[in-house]
Amino acid sequence: MALDPDLLNEAKIAEADLVEAEHAADVARAEFNRAVRRLHLAGASLREAAKALGLSHQRVHQIVEAAGGSRRWRKAAKTPRPGPCSFCGRTAEQVKALIAGPGVYICDRCIPVASQTIATGEPGGPPTAAIEPVAVEDMTEKCSFCGKRRHQVPGLAAAGSARICAECLQLCHEILAERLA
């Protein structure tokens, strides 16, 4: 039995619409999670945020942890010494700030270079530690900090095996402003 070309085309269009809708839902979910985390980092308790948003305390806690955790977690007293910047190799002693992700770090010097790389699409930094843009077509590449794939974010910068997306860079800029103020 032969496939009806019109029905096949209709199915392909519906599939493309579904993929686009799923992507939009993923982006909206991530933006909501970041907004809830920022609300908590700005001083709202988990219970206050939960009550204001009509969610359970446990759900808000899950959202905050999934979006990067609370300030208290970042400032834990007995945390291991951070590794070097995954983008340039500088140690914590050589930079003003080192921001940690899951097994990856970025320093205050590499954050603006990575942002510029994403903005211009041109490599940045010294040749020994060049940060390069990741092409949109590189669908398998993902941010080392949040895990989002290249097609899910406005831009992605890479150095060695480390990757950082534009959204995580924005959060890094906010953390730097808070820490260096």
Image (cartoon, rainbow, N blue to C red):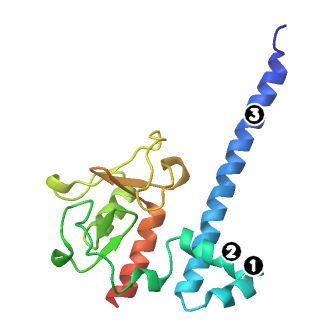
* Numbered mark located on residue 55 in the image: 1
Q: Secondary structure at mark 3?
A: helix
Foreground label between 2 and 3: 2
Q: Which mark, by number, is residue 13?
A: 3
Q: Pick whichever of labels 2 and 3 is earlier in the sequence.
A: 3
Q: Position of residue 159 (x, y in %)?
A: 28, 53
- The residue labelled by disc 2 is 59
**For residue 171, which numbered disc appears in the image?**
none
Percent coordinates x, y for residue 29 in the rendering: 65, 63
Mark 2 and mark 3: Cα distance apart in space: 36 Å
Q: Which image quadrant: the C terminus?
A: bottom left
- The crowd level at tag 2 (other Cα within 10 Å; few <14, some 14-19, many 20+) is few
C-alpha span from label 1 to label 3: 36 Å
Q: Of discs 1 and 3, which sits in the foreground?
A: 1
For the residues labelled 1 and 2, the Cα–Cα distance comes to 6 Å
The amino acid sitting under disc 2 is Arg
Residue 154 appears at what percent x and percent y? Answer: 50, 56
Residue 133 % position (x, y)? 35, 50
Instruction: Name the residue type under label 1.
Output: Leu
Q: Residue at x 33, y 79 (%)?
A: 79
Please name the residue shown 68% across and 43% down the image: 19
Q: Residues within 10 Å of mark 1 (few under 14, many from 20)?
A: few
**In the displayed structure, would residue 104 be above or below residue 78?**
above
Q: Earlier in the sequence, mark 1 or mark 3?
A: 3
Query: For the point 55% across and 80% down, which residue is it?
Result: 38
Q: Residue furthest top?
A: 1
- At 45% from the left edge and 86% from the top edge, which residue is drawn? 72
Question: Splitting the image into 4 quarters, where does residue 32 fall?
Answer: bottom right
- Tag 1 near tag 2, CB within 8 Å: yes
Q: Quadrant of the N terminus?
A: top right
